[in-house]
Amino acid sequence: MHQLKQQHLNTLISIIATVGLAFLTFQCTSAEKKTPIAQELQEDIKFGYNLNNFYVIQDTIQRGESFGEILSRYKVDFSEIYNIANQAKDTFDIRQLRAGKPYMLLCSKDASRTPQSFIYQPNKIEYVVLEFCDSIVAYKQRKPVKIVEKEAFGVIENTLSETMEAQGLPIQLIYDMSDDIYAWTIDFFRLQKGDNFKVIYKQRFVEDSIYAGIESIDAAYFEHKGEPIYAFNYINPDSKTSTDYYDDSGKSLQKAFLKSPVKFSRISSRYNKNRRIAYYGNKVRPHKGTDFAAPVGTPILATANGTVIESTRRGGNGKFVKIRHNATYSTQYLHMSKRMVNVGDFVKQGDVIGKVGMTGNTSGPHVCYRFWKNGRQVDPFRQKLPDAKALSEIYKTDFLEYIAPLKQRLDAIN
């Protein structure tokens, strides 16, 4: 009997030992399986690299700083810098680095901290990679972009920009509304209190939450002086572009002329034949132009298609450009700091023809915009300017079907 009990006891001990060993084996195996998963969760992946594998330097390009200066600071010799720049030039010109833009330098984690890759971000979506650890490789990539559709509504109390900024709307949305969509139909320098707007637009986001600009404005509504003006972004099959805006009847909102030769500016002096000019001792001297105040260096745009007939410097006009648009209209742009077109050049509406300056007789930086009709200087804001080419009738049915749901959505915004 005693031997039988001892056998049962030995068997029980054996079973416990076996189970215990199996449990320990399971734990070890599970731990081994979990280790890579834990490591994977801890990886810091950016731009296709696990940053944990590098000594990382992050900074922004300083004014006047070059690619060579950055790498030489971390002991890369100039012959290697030249070799990197030369082999990467077909993908990226290192002279295109811009002050204020972020970059990342990936270095080895050993004591030498030798640079191995340079990553530059010209904007929030795109980035450039220059690898030079073993061989030199250069390529451009884009971060995944998420498109989010939004709606906005506002009532004008003072200016469009103040109203939209108070709601936290993107600054680009303000510019697109005033300078692209309604630039030809609404004088935003003379809005009235109570004017209102509605807009349906799409925004871009990278990494889910980083704002990366306006993707498009699909539809807008602006009530000015009690008159409603719809705008729908429609791809005109004739022009094959998505930048044509039409009202709810299919009429183009564009005009043959822009209302302003400078974006984001203000009118500092209007066309006035009886104006007193401080520069001339407040004597009455006709001012046959419209002054748009803007910082020196601001781009000046051609307000319509045409041919440059003058590009020179003369007297009180300073540096200027004059464009002949057709047999009826010409425009002139005075006091430039820099002229960027030559006589005989054909320019399109919106092309940059010069930069704002203070050359000639002027007390501050601005462009004096002069408008000629049949050889006589006139006030462009008092002219009935020709419309751009209207939407063809053969597309009208498709257009009306396309805008119907957008118009219904706009009308429902309040």
Image (cartoon, grey):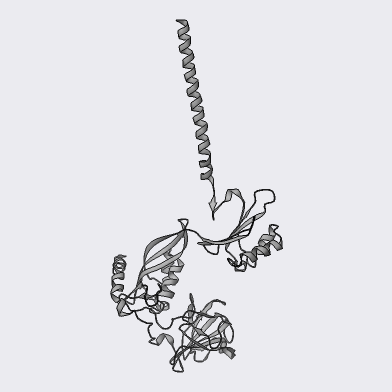
- State whether residue 184 is above or below residue 93: below
User: Is residue 361 toward the left or the right of residue 168 in the image?
Assistant: right
Specify whether residue 66 is in view: no
Q: Quick one: 332 or 304, which is closer to the camera? A: 304
> What residue is at 47 percent from the left and 82 percent from the top?
348
Q: Quick one: 164 or 370, which is closer to the camera? A: 370
Q: Position of residue 13 (x, y in %)?
A: 49, 17
Quadrant occupied by the N terminus: top left
Q: Position of residue 115 (x, y in %)?
A: 65, 55
> What residue is at 37 percent from the left and 83 percent from the top?
387
User: Is residue 223 toward the left or the right of residue 128 in the image?
Assistant: left
User: Is residue 95 toward the left or the right of residue 164 in the image?
Assistant: right
Task: Single out the residue that lies furthest toward the top.
Answer: 1
- State whether residue 53 is above or below residue 295: above
Specify whether residue 13 is in view: yes
- State whether residue 27 is above or below residue 107: above
> What residue is at 56 percent from the left and 89 percent from the top?
280
Q: Position of residue 57 (x, y in %)?
A: 62, 55
Quadrant occupied by the C terminus: bottom left
Q: Quadrant of residue 92?
A: bottom right
Q: Position of residue 147 (x, y in %)?
A: 41, 61
Task: Single out the residue that lies furthest toward the bottom.
Answer: 375
Q: Quadrant of residue 160?
A: bottom left
Q: Quick one: 326 or 141, which is closer to the camera? A: 141
- State whether residue 404 is above or below residue 104: below
